[in-house]
Image: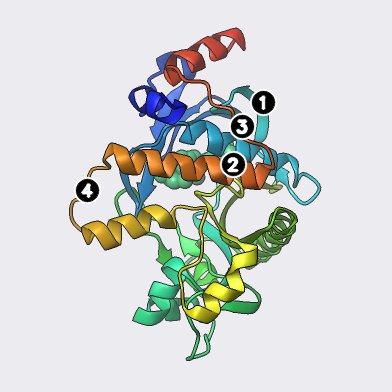
Amino acid sequence: MNPIQAQLAHTLRGTDFEELGERYVGKVRDVYAQDDRLIIVTTDRVSAFDHVLGTIPFKGEILNRMAVDAFRATEDIAKNHLIAVPDPNVVVAKKLKAYPVEMIVRQYITGSLWRDYQSGVADAYELAFAPDLKKDQRFEAPIFTPSTKAEIGTHDEPISKAKIVERGLMTADQLERAEETARRLFARGAERAAARGLILVDTKYELGEDEDGELYVIDELHTPDSSRYWIAEEYEARFAAGDAQRMLDKENLRGWLIEQHGFSGHGTPPALDDEIRVTLASRYFDAYARILGAPFEPTVGDVGDRIRDNLAAAGLL
Ligand SMILES: Nc1ncnc2c1ncn2[C@@H]1O[C@H](COP(=O)(O)OP(=O)(O)O)[C@@H](O)[C@H]1O
Ligand SMILES: [Mg+2]
């Protein structure tokens, strides 16, 4: 049996390490809070339109390995929360005060921005978009489209920089520094992607600060869950023909939900069948190989048990 098939029954849906600290269950991560640090377990859960839909074999490990790689490759741009990696699915991170705004940088109009541009929702950014943009069109320079972080179960909302400050979500200084950092991270991500024949289309950054007001990158970085990647050499021809781009990211799942199940975030989401779970896993394998430049080497087995062993070996349990 191929490893993805074999892993279908062993995916990590959640964890329950009571001794590790107080647990916060996010859509994808289980986060355990200790005094000044967090133990963050990236599970195999997959979400779309802010709903958790099921699990994908090896997804947590793949995402965590990619994020760790990206954190290490951007240390000269900004501090990040990474302290240690006791297991391929787990990081020990510095606990920071997360800004209540997701810092999104985009080089192309696609995905949710394309949907919001067509419906007028994107007016909330106050960016004065040209009226005649085409789907997947490249912007001359990256644009900054922040969103407020929604409470669990609601959707993230586009917001303008003026409103962020007006509503007291961030000070003008914090926002300016955060935007500049997000733009520099994006430039680095785009450069690294280009070296591997990929386009970094857009990405979401979560930033925060410590007690001294020092800025940090938190959460995840340049993974296919937080970033959209396209195949560079196919972009022009596909754009000219009006064809969909070849994606390495979650839009694959969004497409399956919208086109095959008429689900775009409202009502009850469909359950993922094993066929789509396997398809999505192979997309994550593909993304890993392309983005990191080496194949992902899967080890079939119970992820939760392995994490427990590794946390114990690291003295965390
Ligand atoms: N270093 C950090 N300090 C504080 N909060 C963090 C840090 N890293 C990640 N987080 C938060 O932990 C959560 C990670 O879980 P995730 O499943 O991604 O949640 P969500 O459903 O909010 O996307 C997010 O709310 C994220 O903002
Ligand atoms: Mg998240």
Residue position marked by numbered label 3 in the rendering: 93
Looking at the rendered image, the quarter that the N terminus falls into is top left
Q: Position of residue 301 (x, y in %)?
A: 44, 17
Crowdedness near tag 1: few (<14), some (14–19) or many (≥20) residues, C-alpha within 10 Å: some
Q: Who comes first in sequence, dot 2 or dot 1?
A: 1
The residue where tag 4 is placed is: 270
Q: Is residue 198 above or below residue 305?
A: below
From mark 4 to mark 2, how far is it between C-alphas?
A: 27 Å
Q: Please report contact status of discs 2 and 1: CB closer than 8 Å, yes or no.
A: no
Gap in Å between the C-alphas at discs 2 and 1?
A: 21 Å
The residue that disc 1 covers is 84
Label 3 CB-ligand 1 distance < 8 A:
yes
Q: Residue at x 40, y 25 (%)?
A: 7
Secondary structure found at label 2:
helix
Mark 3 to mark 2: distance in Å?
Answer: 23 Å
Classify 10 Å Cα crowding around label 4: few (below 14), some (14-19), many (20 and above). few
Q: CA distance from mark 3 to mark 4?
A: 34 Å
| For residue 153, above or below residue 80 | below
Q: Residue furthest front?
A: 1
Q: Nearer the viewer, mark 1 or mark 4?
A: 4
Would residue 215 appear left or right of 279 to someone viewing this image? Answer: right
Residue beneath disc 2: 288
Q: Closer to the camera, 80 or 277? A: 277
Q: Is residue 158 visible?
A: no
